[in-house]
Image: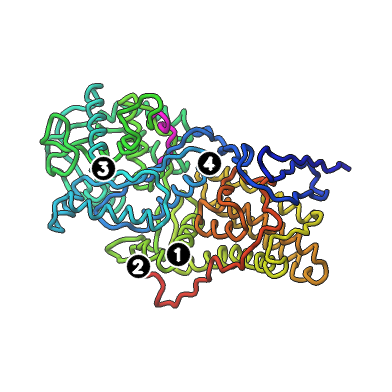
Amino acid sequence: MRLTMVLFFCLAGSTRMYAVRAFSPSLSRTFVARTVARGSALASASPIGTPATSVDDGKSPFEITTPIYYVNDKPHVGHAYTSTACDVIARFMRLSGREVFFLSGTDEHGQKVEQSAEKRGVDPQTFVDEVSVNFRELLELMNISADKFIRTTDAGHKESVQHLWNTLVEKGYIYLGAYEGWYSVRDECYYNESELVDGKAPTGAEVEWVTKEDSYFFKLSAFQDRLLEYYEDNPGFIAPESRKNEVVSFVKGGLRDLSVSRTSFSWGVPVPGDDDHVMYVWIDALTNYISALGYPSTEPDSDFDKFWPAALHVVGKDILRFHAVYWPAMLMAADLPLPRRIFAHGWWTKDGEKISKSIGNVIDPVELVEKFGVDQTRFFLTSEVNFGNDGDFSDEAMIRRVNTNLANELGNLVQRTLTMVFKNCDKAVPINVGPYTEADEELLAQARNLRETVSTAVSVQAIHLYSQGMIEMVRLANKYIDDQEPWVLRKTDPDRMATVLYVLMEVLRYVAILYQPIIPDSSNRILDVLTVPKDERTFAYLSDDYAIQQGNPVTKPQPIFPRLELPTEELVDA
């Protein structure tokens, strides 16, 4: 039998004693009985990074972006979905010790915006100033931790776009010609005749015939082979795999030069040297990913140098073509590095029907939050469907998932555990913690391995697997408390009861720290009641060295996730 080895050491100027242990899972656990202060070199734990992938080394500075949202209308659930998914990844990376630049914003130019402003009877700038606020407020409402909110009407952005345009001209990839063909104002996209479905765009949008007008063109056709070669050499560049196959098929079908300016409307970035033309909105919009980093400033130690090309673009599947074909081709033409990865997620339906203003079933994220709560909405959006696939929203599905996974499982576990601690352990973290049993060690081992499991999922944007991993850990803890029955041990073996409750508190510490990216406010409320110091809530503190201090006073717990029991007439209406 191996002996448990314990090394106690105390830091200079500190009163906290640490224990470094080597033990067999079948042997008893040693524990640290004395509490001490933080503030030393060891207490400020070192960064730990994330698992390396084919597109990310797991430690370098990291940029993650939402698409910039088009301001022709108010935000809907799709905007909340993309923003929340990106926020989960950004928070996870930060808690893993990585430097993150999380970018979101609004796309404010184009014919559609000009028309919407005209209908409102205001000038385009006034219109976008008003509507852009709605998207900024959505990020605040959903507790989105974006580092920068960019607007394409910002002066600095327009200068960046014009610099990129001039670069493409200098390198011979933009020329003046004439355009005639099908165009969708809603999609801000040109379509070939062969792409139309029943006279409409593949997205269902109306198209109009653009009569012959002068236009500058980008030599997209020159990049067909280079793009296909890049996709082949960098298989992780586009995800999921099904979306990559769609892009490859589109490019293999042949690329035509892209019209990149218009003269039939004026609300856009002027073409340098030709004020009769404004730039095609997608050249303007896509450049935001580097203009936000200070492009054309690319010198060492600049934000561009730090975060580009270590970038992940998360987009809806409807705009994948612009990001996976047009954007990399433009970057290749400008001799700029390409982003590391483009991930396209699916669409939401409502009660099995496509969401549409004409049908009247658009889901307002503000109403979702008002009815269900911020963390509850974040949790549903990140756990209900496989990220990358389409998903269906219904009030019943939201209530069922939140009640099952948050109220019944996680919330009830916290309530049962901390109530017993408060009532039976002198309103303090248990101190009579005895030797650990095999069941204790097994559950703790699952908790210790949880970060590795969910980190692997997040590193490939499988946030649904991250959520499922958290749900499963909570279920294991619930099975443990049911098997151990501390309410029975209270009378038959108080010392064993104390050990069981302490094990549960430690498992909940791991769970709450790792749940922060998905349900940040609720997780921190749990960490508060567990007495976890606010400066010990990053992933670097997921070790036994930072176990909950025995004897810490606890307060009476309050419900974290009230059950959702809304009358039918009060459920969120489309």
User: Is residue 185 or residue 574 the one in the foreground?
Assistant: 574
What residue sits 61% from the left and 54% below the top? 532
Q: Amino acid at mark 4?
A: Ser
**Considering only vertical position in the picture, is 486 above or below 569?**
above
How far is disc 2 from disc 3 in space, using C-alphas?
A: 30 Å
Q: Assign a secondary structure to mark 1.
A: loop
Which residue matches tag 3? 152
Q: Assess whether mark 4 and mark 3 are in contact (beta carbons under 8 angstroms).
A: no
Label for residue 288? Answer: none
Q: Earlier in the sequence, mark 2 or mark 4?
A: 4
Give the quadrant of residue 51. Answer: top right
How far is disc 4 from disc 1 in space, using C-alphas?
A: 27 Å
Which residue matches tag 2? 574
Q: Magenta stretch?
A: 305-313
Label for residue 373? Answer: 1
Label for residue 459? Answer: 4
Q: Amino acid at mark 3?
A: Thr
Taking the image as shown, residue 4 lies to the left or right of residue 422, namely: right
Q: Nearer the viewer, mark 2 or mark 1?
A: 1
